[in-house]
Amino acid sequence: MAARILVVEDEPAVQELMRYTLEQAGMEVFTAASAEDALESLRDELPDAVLIDWMLPNKSGLALARELRETTRTADLPLIIVTARGEEADRVKGLDQGADDYVVKPFSPRELVARIQAVLRRRAPHTSDAALAAGGLMLNPVSHEVTLNDSAVELGPTEFRLLHFFLAHPERVYTRAQLLDQVWGDHVFIEERTVDVHIRRLRVALGDEGEDLIKTVRGSGYKLSAAKPHSAGYAKAHATPQ
Ligand code: CA
């Protein structure tokens, strides 16, 4: 799926250049002109990464980055700081505040895109075009093909995005609110039971293994479990007695 990037930049011309550059690279772009605007936008929707200009009116980009890192909901958001300051000390300061990377103005469009893509590959693999595999499942984001034990699986667009996200983060438990944020991009206006509906459809499409692959974690949410039941049994049978 197209990576969604929030661009926080107060200069309209630079903001426009960034939007154009990222859209040309197939990304979906949201913009904010200040840290306050960015926080407002993030309350409604979580992007896949945030590009933050260091010099913003009122609250600085660095202060915004620190605040996002200290807030549970945004703590894991990939952050890239953009600045005209290139000095080593500032760079270290930026990375200390929790930025994943650093782009110095003036930047070439190609460099900007490459840096964002590198951060996304590392931090948001569900936005990449790389094929993912786990637990007998194989998903190809480019051809939109999914196979389970080499048999084709037919999925609707939402189930495809959901499975793509789970395959990028196997064995990690996500709450319904987190899945709405990450897969739908919206945890405010969509009801949590929507997640249950699409989990059910995904499981049905995966047939007999649906319940084993997409596990309900009571009181928490859902996770993709790539460990086959028989290999778990094997591990147990061969575990050293306590
Ligand atoms: Ca600025």
Image (tube, helix red, strand yellow):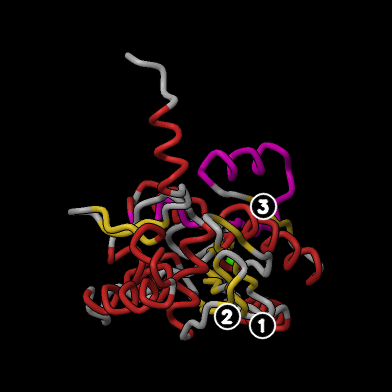
Which of discs 3 and 1 lies nearer the camera? The answer is 1
For the point 63% across and 74% down, the residue is 141
Residue picked out by circle 3: 102
Please tell me which of labels 3 and 2 falls first in the chain. 2
Q: Is mark 2 within 8 Å of ligand 1?
A: no
Identified by mark 1, the residue type is Glu
**What is the CA distance from the residue labelled 3 to the residue labelled 1?**
20 Å
Determine if the magenta segment contains residue 87.
yes
Q: In this figure, which residue is indicated by the disc labeled 1?
A: 23
Of circles 3 and 2, the one toward us is 2
- x, y percentage for residue 150? 62, 68
Residue at 47% of width from left, 41% of height from top?
231
* Residue type, label 2: Glu
Residue 55 shows which numbered tag? none
Q: Residue at x 54, y 59 (%)?
A: 168
Say whether residue 44 is visible. no
The image position of residue 170, as x and y in percent, is: 47, 53
Position of the C terminus, as image quadrant, is top left
Report how far apart the C-alphas of labels 1 and 2 lie in the structure: 6 Å
> Mark 1 vs mark 2: which is more N-terminal?
1
| Residue 92 or residue 121, whichever sits in front | 121
Magenta part of the chain = 73-98
The quarter of the rendering in which ligand 1 is drawn is: bottom right
| Residue 180 point in image, percent of width and height | 34, 71
| Secondary structure under the numbered disc 3 in the rendered image | strand
Disc 3 vs disc 1: Cβ atoms closer than 8 Å? Answer: no
Taking depth in this image into account, of 151 and 192 the one nearest to the observer is 151
Q: Nearer the viewer, residue 195 or 60?
A: 195
